[in-house]
Amino acid sequence: MKAGTFTQIYIQLVFSPMNRHALLEKSIRPRLFEYMSGIVTNLGHKSIIINGMPDHVHLFLGLNPKIAISDTVKEIKRASSLFINEHRLSNGKFQWQNGYGGFSYSRSQVEKVYNYILNQESHHQITTFRQEYLNILKKHEIEFDENYLFEFFDD
């Protein structure tokens, strides 16, 4: 980063295992999320919190503007898939589904987003992943075509 360059960019990433299979069992999530946090840190970003459910993951990070969000997601998915498969943390070959959601937040929203991601289990007792994802898209006023969303199987 050059002298006189200052950034403060907070991004929430959301993505899912291939075909939204519930492969992220509770027993593997802490180990996986710690590994994913290491990937984020090694890319020069600041890992704030990573949490999720069996069928999706939320990553909240302070973005290093030198690295594109798409490259960040690509590397997180690539390296974490290798980690899951090499350590046999899932039955069969693990893959992430194509696509992701990337949402920006201001500094004043960091605590709220952190707590939201921290409390995924209680949140999903009343809201499906599909409802959650659509709500995030609408809240951020992102236009979308339902044909290009994740494959949701809870309809």
Image (spheres, grey):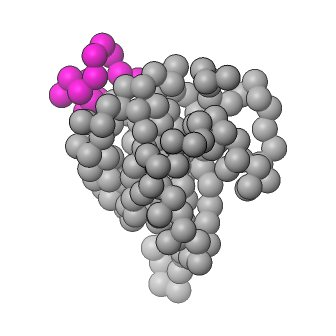
Task: Let me know if residue 128 appears in the view.
Answer: yes
Location of the N terminus by quadrant is: bottom left
Say whether residue 4 is magenta: no
Camera-side residue: 151 or 122? 122
Q: Position of residue 111 (x, y in %)?
A: 50, 72
Looking at the image, is 123 positioned above or below residue 23? below
Residue 128 x, y percent position in the rendering = 59, 36
Relative horizontal placement of residue 63, taking residue 103 as reference (left or right): left
Quadrant that contains the C terminus = top right
Q: Residue at x 46, y 31 (%)?
A: 55
Side (left or right) of 147 relative to 123: right
So how many labels did they put on this image? 0
Query: Which span is picked out in magenta?
Result: 82-95
Q: Residue at x 62, y 61 (%)?
A: 104
Residue furthest out toward the bottom: 4
Tell me where residue 56 appears, x and y as whole percent.
47, 36
Q: Main secondary structure of the magenta part?
A: loop
Q: Is residue 96 left or right of residue 148?
A: left
Name, please, the residue furthest toward the left: 87
Instruction: Tell me: residue 7, above or below residue 39.
Output: below
- Please say if 67 is above or below 22: below
Residue 87, magenta (yes or no):
yes
Q: Residue furthest front?
A: 126
Residue 39 vertical position relative to residue 65 in the rendered view, above or below: above
Give the residue drawn at x 58%, y 37%: 129
